[in-house]
Each structure stands twice: as C-alpha cells, then as structure tokens.
Image (cartoon, helix red, strand yellow):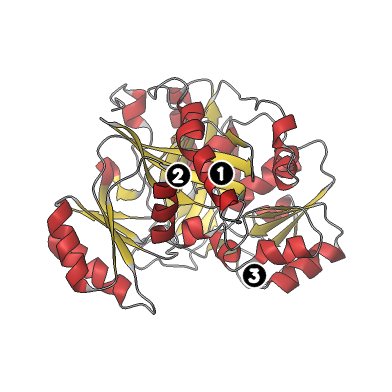
C-alpha cells in the first residue's frame, strides 16, 4: 500500500519510519515532512490545514491510507474532507477531535460516560476563575479550553501565576478555560487505537512535561519519555480501555461522532485509582515515540484496520521486551523564546550508538543545505535496549555527541524509574 502521513515533527518522523517498516507498504508520502523524514519518504510542501489540497495530494499519489499526525488539521476537519473524497483515514473527524479541541467538551463527554477524572470548573470570566481557585485550592491547575500545542496548561502553587495564565486564556477570542483539582500520583500516557467501535491500547509510557530536571520550570510540549512502565499496575492498559477509552468511544458513537484514530488518555495514578487528566486526538510527542518504538505489530496494517473498521478481527498487538527512552534536545531559549537557525552536527555519530534513532522535531535546511534548528524542540533521541538502564545510557551517549549551540535537555529522563523510586497510587 501507499501511505500519506501529514505533519512535520518528531511524532510524524516516528510514524513515517514505523509505517515504512511495514512489509505491506510500498511507498510513504509526507506532507510537508522535514529533513529527517525526507530520508525515508517523499516530502511534498502542502498546507495540511487545507483539506482540499490534502485530498488532491492523496488522489495524485493514489494512496491507500491517510494518517493525520498533528491536532490542528484534525480540528480543522481535514480527515472529513479526505474521507468524503473516498480515502481511508486514520484520524478523527472534526466533531470527534473536539475531545482535544475543547477541554470543556471532553469533561462533558467524560461525565456522560462515567469516566473517572478531576473535578473541574469551566470559566469564561475572571470572577468565575477566582471562585474556582478558591473552591479547589492549590496546587492550581488552569487549562486553556482550546488547542495550545501542549503548552496551554499551568500547574502552580502560585495563585498569581494561575491568575496570569487565566487572563491570557480569557483574552483570546471566545476565551474559555478549565480550572481543575490537582491530581496526585505519577502520570501515565496510554494511547488507544479505535475504529469507532473496537479499542486496543498501546503499551503505556511516561512523559516529562517540565523543562528542567526534577520537574522544575515551566511546562513544555514534552522533554522526554520512556516505556514500558515496570512499576505500573499489571494490566493497566486493559483496565484503561475498559474504564476510560471504551466508554468514551461508545459515548462519541452515541452522539453521532464516531472516533476513528488514536485517543490519547493522559492519566494520574492517584491514591483513589486512575483518573483522566486530559484527552488528545493524536499520538503524544514524545511519549508516542516511546510506545511506538517497542511495537512489533506492522503499524500501517494496524492503522488501516482502524481506518476501515477492522480492529475486531485484527488480533492482539505484539511487543518487544526491550525498553525505550526518548530524550528531547531543545533549542536555546525554549520554551519562552526559542532561538532558530543554529547549525546542528553530530547526528551521524549519534546514530552509531547501538539501538539509537534520531528523530527530527524542529529542523530545516538553510540556503547552503546545512541542517539548522527550526523550532523549540529540535531533536528526539530514541534509544531501545534490553533494560531501562542500558536504554538511558545509549540515549544520553547519543545526546552527548550532538552539537547545537545553546541547546539544553533534561538529564533525568526515566532516572527515578531506573532507581525504583516510583510507586503508583
């Protein structure tokens, strides 16, 4: 089959590599792709928010499957346009993507489906925000209602910072936000593949959102991840399908908006059991890369089964026993004011480390064809090894030989797990 992957980040680079490795796949087209993806797929400069342009590209290359990577085209309805044009699409409709596009809508669906989640107040005025902060207390959790590229959430003990973020959210057109109770316990990412009826879960991963070691500093789009989670309760993924994903998928179908694609379930394993922090309508980044790195089931065939209603007959997923660790290399100034245009070297040496793959997150070629930074998160260094300790060592050995002026990364990705210091609530 031929597969078209939409997007230009490390998540899409991981998807392209996984899809290309499927023995059923003849060719992969990426739109718009990036310099790393270009080594595996044909990259075409198309506006992925333009559904008609994407459908025309799919028609031109006679693709059998369209895979939508990022959230923005999903919320914009690109999957709808491609489906109407007759293509199999992995990615939810605009109506179903509201599970990510609106935090308040997601809360409404969770309530209807009896999904365990944090108490929340939907606010449209600062008066409502102040009352919600009073009611729920610190730590304060304030979330922009709409899409914010993974950076719309503030978790802080400072009421001043919570109020400042709330004002920024409400200042947007039709500004709305959600103030939530803080959930204790370690956080877990579970990616659930759905064809609108049947749901299967990928192996759980853990993501690191804060910019600095020991979870210090502001939230980012994600600074690293690892999988599997040896400390998590046995059968966690199946439990989340039963208690969270399947009821949510059933509720969306009941509402006339069947969800076809990947439902990201962000969880806190609290002392009162697992509770949902948020839903996303696509693979996480970089936690999705950690889960995909260990998946042995042919990925394109899995995504096609989901896109065509065939998950019930697809069979169980197969997993490597290895461990995967992802370390993000970020540009100078990230996340507040990322610097771009800096030369990147050392990638060949990094990929010589056994078990390491380097995914391009924010890169470009300058006028002379040299690789330079083009975003806040620049590279994902993914290492797969027989143990968590060896995977961490390989990832950091590879990071050490990459040169990007002013870059920074966390040095403690999966460290507490390696030391056996994480205990699920």
* Residue where numbered disc 2 is placed: 113
On the image, the x and y values in percent for residue 196 come to 64, 46
Quarter of the image where one finds residue 256: bottom right
Local crowd size for mark 3, using a 10 Å CA cut-off: few (<14), some (14–19), many (≥20):
few
Q: Residue at x 79, y 57 (%)?
A: 87
Q: Residue at x 15, y 66 (%)?
A: 130
In depth, the one of 48 and 272 nearer the eye is 272
Disc 1 vs disc 3: which is toward the camera?
1
* Residue where numbered disc 1 is placed: 250
Disc number at residue 88?
Answer: none
Query: Is 333 above or below relative to 221?
Result: below
Mark found first going from the N terminus, 1 or 3: 1
In depth, the one of 420 and 182 nearer the eye is 182
Q: How far, Cα to Cα, is label 1 from label 2? A: 8 Å
In depth, the one of 234 and 95 nearer the eye is 95
Q: Secondary structure at mark 2?
A: helix
Local crowd size for mark 2, using a 10 Å CA cut-off: few (<14), some (14–19), many (≥20):
some
* Residue where numbered disc 3 is placed: 368
| Residue 330 seen from this side | yes
Quarter of the image where one finds residue 152: bottom left
Q: How far, Cα to Cα, is label 3 from label 2? A: 55 Å
Quarter that holds the C terminus? top left
| Residue 371 seen from this side | no
Local crowd size for mark 1, using a 10 Å CA cut-off: few (<14), some (14–19), many (≥20):
some
On the image, the x and y values in percent for residue 317 come to 65, 27
């Amino acid at each position: 089959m031929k597969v078209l992957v939409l997007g230009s980040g490390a998540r899409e680079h991981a998807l392209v590599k996984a899809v290309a490795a499927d023995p059923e796949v003849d060719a992969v087209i990426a739109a718009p792709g990036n310099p790393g993806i270009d080594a595996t797929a044909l990259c075409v400069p198309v506006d992925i928010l333009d559904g008609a342009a994407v459908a025309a590209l799919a028609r031109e290359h006679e693709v059998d499957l369209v895979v939508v990577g990022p959230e923005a085209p999903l919320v914009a309805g690109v999957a709808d346009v491609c489906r109407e044009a007759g293509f199999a699409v992995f990615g939810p409709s605009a109506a179903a993507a509201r599970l990510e596009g609106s935090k308040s809508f997601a809360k409404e669906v969770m309530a209807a489906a009896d999904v365990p989640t944090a108490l929340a107040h939907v606010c449209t005025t600062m008066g409502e925000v102040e009352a919600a902060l009073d009611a729920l207390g610190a730590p304060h959790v304030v979330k922009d209602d709409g899409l914010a590229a993974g950076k719309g959430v503030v978790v802080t003990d400072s009421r001043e910072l919570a109020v400042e973020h709330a004002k920024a959210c409400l200042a947007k057109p039709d500004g709305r936000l959600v103030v939530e109770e803080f959930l204790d316990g370690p956080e877990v990412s579970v990616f659930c593949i759905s064809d609108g009826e049947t749901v299967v879960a990928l192996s759980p991963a853990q993501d690191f959102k804060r910019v600095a070691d020991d979870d210090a500093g502001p939230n980012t789009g994600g600074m690293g991840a690892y999988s599997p989670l040896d400390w998590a309760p046995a059968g966690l993924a199946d439990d989340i399908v039963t208690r969270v994903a399947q009821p949510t998928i059933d509720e969306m179908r009941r509402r006339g908006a069947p969800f076809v694609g990947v439902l990201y379930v962000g969880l806190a394993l609290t002392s009162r059991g697992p509770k949902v922090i948020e839903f996303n309508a696509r693979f996480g980044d970089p936690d999705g890369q950690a889960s995909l790195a260990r998946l042995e089931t042919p990925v394109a065939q899995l995504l096609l089964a989901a896109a065509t209603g065939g998950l019930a007959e697809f069979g169980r997923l197969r997993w490597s026993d290895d461990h995967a660790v992802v370390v993000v290399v970020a540009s100078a100034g990230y996340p507040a004011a990322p610097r771009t245009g800096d030369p990147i070297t050392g990638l060949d040496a990094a990929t010589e480390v056994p078990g390491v793959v380097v995914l391009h997150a924010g890169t470009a070629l300058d006028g002379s064809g040299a690789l330079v930074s083009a975003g806040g998160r620049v590279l994902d260094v993914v290492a797969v090894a027989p143990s968590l300790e060896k995977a961490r060592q390989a990832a950091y050995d590879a990071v050490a030989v990459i040169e990007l002026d002013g870059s920074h990364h966390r040095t403690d990705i999966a460290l507490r797990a390696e030391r056996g210091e994480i205990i699920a609530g």
